[in-house]
Image (cartoon, grey):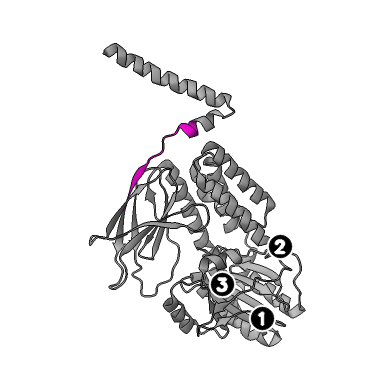
Amino acid sequence: MQIIKQKQKLHNPMKKAMLTAVMIAAGLSPLMVKAQQTPMPKQITVKGKVKFDVPAGNPRKVWLSRENGTGKPQVVDSVEMGQDLTYSFRIKQDHPGIYKLNIMYWDHITFWSDADVSVSSRGYDTAKMKIKIPHFYYVQGSRDNDFINQMELNSTNGYLRSVEDYNQEYYAKEHKQKTGDSAWITYLNTRPRYNKGSDDAQQRRDLLMKMYKDRPVLIYALRYAGSPDDTSAYNSTLAQLDRLLKLYPWLTEAKNLKTTITNNRLQAMKLKPGQMAPSISYPDDMGKLQNLEKYKGKYVLIDFWASWCGPCRQAIPKVKELYAQYKDKGLEVVSISIDTDKKAWARAMADEKMPWEQMLSDNKDKTMEDFQFSGIPTLYLLDREGKIVTKYTGYSPEAEAGIKEAVDKGVAAKPAGERKVMQAMSM
């Protein structure tokens, strides 16, 4: 019996070595061979703990969804939290992928499912004034999962820094107007900076993607990497997806994502400056369907926003000033909300008292696909014929100056590049 066991021990390594040799001879690199021989967990456990409960009457549920590369995550399970504010899921899968936890419609946490994971989150906000802003939570899991941890932290900090930079400039200008003291704004405009916040965040993303370029979890970063306006970035993303599919033929998300990115690029070409804006038909605050036909002959600033979006709400007072100054010069504003909670939308409208037309998208995903945005506020400026002049991701002094210049000079839409001015709140 002892001799037979020894033969079995010798046989399995030899069989594995022969299989490896065959795969390499077929054109697969040693890295690809190793990737395809890596075992995949068929089942994992997800455990979570929440610190603060929701107010009475609100759902105490956690939803689990999986991303499939189409841009439309699929809810696969949900659970009621226990009295101790804990929850757990058991995921059965044929291969690992990207999952997201939606905790009481408040916290949103992403992880990679190649090992058991656990996470503690704050839960419902206890502040008197609630503003939805990103928050980073560390998910304890595998090494591949740490890629998502680092990407999430980088994204959160980059977003918060962009808001802080915007606030600094806004209040520095306000200080100058009120006091005549220009030292603060002069310092901000002239001080040497080692790097812009957006460039710093991009360097971190690039480094992480190099470190994990041969891992399937790279799919997480490639979801928004194929910029339709940057042919080089677009081609690079497709090449990286092709590489992942060679390394991991089971990664169906990579195939789906390639199709999604290709289709998005085709749609983005229809949104270039000089093109007619897509036709819309959305209900207004009275429930009546509206479109943009009535605005022919005027400039129109379309503002995509939501009640829970901090930067959107922060921009509204500035848009009000712009509207008051340029309405008589032929500028109209139309706000299109992607809220899914009509009551929250109504409360926000009552709070903000925006003196222009309000519409509510009846299909958030289709609206975001039609107008090609993944963060808000996103703004489109249309000329008097309804053609796209330019698109702004986020509202900033640069965006405001561009809008004013277009109206003052009577600029007509013509082919040009997108002007991205600040990071918007990601969906």
Distance from Cα at disc 2 to Cα at disc 3: 20 Å
Residue 322 in sight here? no
Q: Amino acid at mark 3?
A: Phe
SS at mark 2?
loop
- Residue 35 falls inside the magenta stretch: yes
Q: Amino acid at mark 1?
A: Glu
- Residue 270 falls inside the magenta stretch: no
SS at mark 1?
helix
Q: Is residue 291 left or right of residue 127?
A: right
Occupied quadrant, residue 180: bottom right
Q: Position of residue 155 (x, y in %)?
A: 50, 56
- Residue located beneath label 2 in the image: 417
Q: Position of residue 47 (x, y in %)?
A: 31, 51
Residue 291 in sight here? yes
Q: Position of residue 152 (x, y in %)?
A: 47, 54
Asked whether disc 1 touches disc 3, contact meaning CB atoms under 8 Å apart, the reply is: no
The N terminus, quarter of image: top left
Magenta residue span: 34-47
- Picture disc at residue 335: none
- Residue located beneath label 3 in the image: 304
In front here: 201 or 80?
Answer: 80
- Residue located beneath label 1 in the image: 293
**Residue pushed farthest left?**
83
Q: Tag 3 or tag 2, which sits nearer the N-term?
A: 3
Residue that appears at 58% across and 63% down: 369
Q: Amino acid at mark 2?
A: Gly
